[in-house]
Image (tube, rainbow, N blue to C red):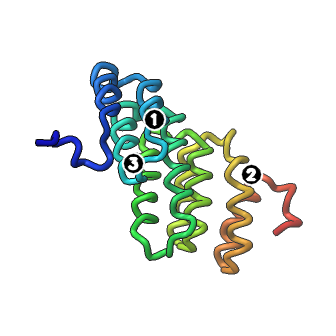
Amino acid sequence: APMAAASAPDLDFDDVSYEEDILRNPFSLKHWWWYLEFKHKAPQKYRYMIYERAVKNLPGSYKLWFKYLTERAFNCKNLSLEDAEWEQTNAAFERALVTMHKMPRIWLDYLKFLIQQKRVTLIRRTFDRALRALPITQHNRIWPLYLRFVQSARIPELAVRVYRRFLKIEPDRVEEF
């Protein structure tokens, strides 16, 4: 009779050695990285499971979260906005922000991802959360995208509120307003 593992389409014999490495070194980024590199052609569902296990063991790994979120966002590109994958990727960004809330790049990538979804209230609230979470010295990373967003949203009250807030820290840019 064939081995039971042979019936699982995503597992092959080589996975066993990677899984054993992970069991011995669950907090080693390089072991998770090697496993993900090895599975680079695996179905995304399977790769996401590996990523989720990896970030559960290494929640403070910027490199791991960045690679995972970038891959998830990229895989949404050609999907309908109604596809559940968008919401699942939003949830992955939210999980990342539990430990990565001081990383402007994660916020920016999430905000750009939300802007593609055209959910104005969620986008505005997430910009506000980013500005609250990040030190003021990093706000200059967030404001340009926020201002571009309110200009493109074409909601005058929103633009006025956001620009008034912006001008409190950048009064020299009143002309833009």
Question: Residue 124: in sight, yes or no?
Answer: no
Q: Provide the secondary structure element on which disc 3 rests.
A: helix
Q: Residue furthest front?
A: 1
Question: Which of pointers 3 and 2 indicates the residue nearer the eye?
Answer: 3
* Mark sitting earlier along the chain (1/3): 1
Amino acid tagged 3: Tyr
Q: Provide the secondary structure element on which disc 1 rests.
A: helix
* Mark sitting earlier along the chain (1/2): 1
Contact flag, marks 1 and 3 (Cβ < 8 Å): no
Q: Provide the secondary structure element on which disc 2 rests.
A: helix
Amino acid tagged 1: Phe
Question: Residue 9: in sight, yes or no?
Answer: yes
Quarter residue 1 falls in: top left
Neighbourhood count class around disc 3 (C-alpha, 10 Å): few under 14, some 14–19, many 20 upward: some
Contact flag, marks 1 and 2 (Cβ < 8 Å): no
Q: Read off the residue under disc 2.
A: 169
Q: Is 25 on the left or on the right of 139, as rendered?
A: left
Q: Position of residue 94 (x, y in %)?
A: 43, 52
Q: Position of residue 127 (x, y in %)?
A: 58, 58
- Residue at the spot x=21%, y=48% of the render? 7
Amino acid tagged 2: Ile
- Residue at the spot x=28%, y=24% of the render? 20
Disc number for residue 67 = none
Neighbourhood count class around disc 1 (C-alpha, 10 Å): few under 14, some 14–19, many 20 upward: few
- Residue at the spot x=87%, y=55% of the render? 172
* Mark sitting earlier along the chain (3/2): 3
